[in-house]
Amino acid sequence: MNMIDTHCHLDFAAFDADRDEVFERAKISGLTGFVIPAVKQSSWQALIKLCAQYDNVYYALGLHPIFIREHQADDVQLLRDSVESSQPVAIGEIGLDFYDRSLALEKQLDLFERQLAVACDVQLPVILHVRKAHQEVLACLEKFPVTGGVVHAFNGSMQIAERYMEHNFKFGFGGMLTYERSSKLRKLAKQLPLESIVLETDSPDMTVEAHRGQRNSPEYLPDCLAALAQVREMDIDVVAEQTTHNAYDLFERMRQ
């Protein structure tokens, strides 16, 4: 089975001690591609260099809302310049996080919209981080019609999902799907069209149930695949093939 981890942070320090081994174990587990989204401008060049060292490892460039206090005034212009001089597969990880009310909401909105404008101009999909802000994100997507993208770690309603699908978005499912207590999420994973689902781990966070309390890793993506096949009552090979196809459909530059 071929699988793609569409969202993992293998550039984080949590992998500094054994990054090569993690890649090797993940490939043995069946992974044939990895997408690493950036979170702040200071990490972009190191991320690009890291991805160049491995086969089938791709990057996205963006400014994560969680780090709103660290982003600088010229970071969006630097994003535009970096996108034009490099080959990211997407703009991301970007979005809105209204869960933590200490994060400046107006600054988040301004930053998000300016990054959406870049995505529109360069015709790249976006990787979205959304917490307690689906209505606001959808309103922004009405103003900035990007080519599409993925809602990372989606756990909204089917109604909200349908609105995202109108904007050509897919939905990332990962470790939380492996927990039986995630009844709402598992129901959603069963209801959504399989063509709209991609697999992800969000490593090193949001680990699978079998490795509860441990560092998450792309090598555990087969657990996410198995959980998705189980809740949909489908053949695991069929689910693997379709979600991999979905990833290539989403990130067209991976085919180049």
Image (tube, helix red, strand yellow):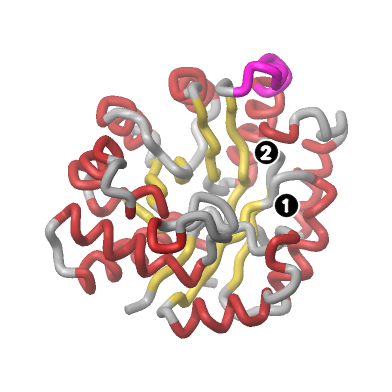
In the displayed structure, would residue 121 be above or below residue 135? below
Question: Where does residue 110 sit, x and y in percent of width and height?
Answer: 70, 21
Question: Where does residue 255 sit, x and y in percent of width and height?
Answer: 49, 70
Q: Which residue is mark 1?
A: 83
Residue 113 seen by the camera: yes
Give the residue drawn at x 78%, y 69%: 49
Query: For this rendering, which residue is in front, 77 or 198?
Result: 198
Q: Which residues are magenta?
A: 100-108
Q: Which residue is mark 2?
A: 64
Mark 2 or 1: in front is 2
Residue 234 left/right relative to 255: left
Q: Is residue 105 magenta?
A: yes
Count of numbered badges drawn on the protein: 2
Upstream in sequence: badge 2 or badge 1 = 2
Q: Are there few (<14), some (14-19), or many (20+) residues within 10 Å of tag 2?
A: many
Residue 58 left/right relative to 172: right
Residue 256 left/right relative to 237: right
Q: Which mark is residue 135?
A: none
Question: Where does residue 5 sit, x and y in percent of width and height?
Answer: 48, 63
Give the residue drawn at x 50%, y 50%: 206
Give the residue drawn at x 26%, y 57%: 228
Residue type at tag 1 = Val
Which corner quadrant of the image does residue 78 belong to? top right
In the displayed structure, would residue 108 be above or below residue 227? above
**Mark 2 vs 1: CB contact within 8 A:** no
Q: Is residue 84 magenta?
A: no
